[in-house]
Image (cartoon, grey):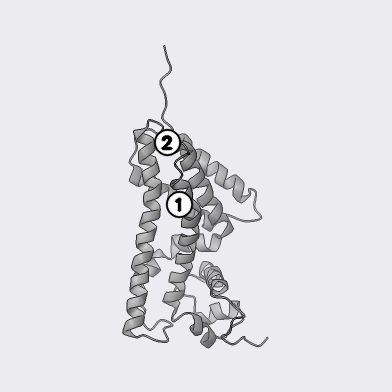
Amino acid sequence: MARKPADQSVSPEEIVRAAADVLREHGYDATTMKDIASRVNLTAASLYHHFKSKDFLLLAVLELGLEQAIAKVEPIAADPNMSHTDKLRAMIHTHVLEVTTNTAIGAAMVFEIKSLLNANFGPRGSSANDKASKEEFFQRRDNFFQRRASFERQFRKVIEEGMAAGAFRQVDAAIVAKAMLGAHNWVGVWFKPNGRLSGEQVAEIMSDTFLVSLTAVKEELA
């Protein structure tokens, strides 16, 4: 089949999702722009019309996953009418369910963060290794990590507020928040869409498990 030119027949998001699939199958180092282009029926040259390098494409995969999670979880974290328990339960459930519907991106959040840290917009698949492009890449990468830290802080804040209100037992909120988000992202590694449990069921189990572990045990009255 003939490859498509760099036109509007393939959207940037379609390319990013295809890239996530290829990254999950082969890993960053073994993946080439040609592999990704082939997945969306483009030539490698056409792919560079949308993304300047493999580093930029990896960054786009991670940005997409993070921003989708933020868009769904942030309104819950900001809801003043929910109890601390209901809020955290909904945040966990929503994030896990998001990962089960985007498993390749979730897996990239586990396996490719180091690749992003090591990326330097160098000769690996780069078509325009110029100063302005490097600055753009590093600025976007810094912003990604800032946004990821902000996302994590939302979970930590709800845990801390729950502890202060007596709803949650005293824990190291920073460590617990990291453990939660790590577990959520790992769902993208092992979850099977046609497996024994649905995404909804997995999200329910994980939210129940974390809430049970955090819920303060109230002493029974004598």
**Image-based side of 157 in relation to 60, left or right:** left
- Whether residue 136 is situated above or below residue 194 in the rendered picture: below
Which residue is more in the foreground, 57 or 69?
Answer: 69
| Secondary structure at numbered mark 2 | helix
Can residue 188 be seen? yes
Depth order, front residue of 30/209: 209
Residue, x 34% and y 37% (percent of image)?
Answer: 171
Tell me residue 75's x, y (percent). 47, 50
Q: Tell me if mark 1 has few (under 14), some (14-19) or many (20+) residues whose alpha carbon lies within 10 angstroms of its own.
A: some
Residue drawn at x 43%, y 17% as measured from the top left: 220
On screen, residue 195 versus residue 138, left or right, reads right
Query: Dividing the image into 4 quarters, which one contains the C terminus?
Result: top left
Q: Residue furthest top?
A: 222
Question: Which residue lies at the image location 49% right of the left edge and 62% below the top edge?
Answer: 65
Q: Which mark is residue 74?
A: 1
In this view, the mark in front (2 or 1): 1
Left/right placement of residue 105 relative to residue 197 reads: left
Give the crowd class for mark 2: few <14, some 14-19, many >=20 residues within 10 Å.
Answer: some
**For marks 2 and 1 on the same chain, the one whose residue lies earlier in the sequence:** 1
Q: Position of residue 2 (x, y in %)?
A: 66, 88
- List x then y, in percent, for residue 132: 33, 82
In the image, residue 92 sits, relative to residue 10, either above or below, namely above
Picture disc at residue 214:
2
Q: With respect to residue 20, does 152 lie above or below?
A: above
The picture quadrant where one finds residue 114 is: bottom left
Element assignment for label 1: helix
* Residue 107 visible here: no
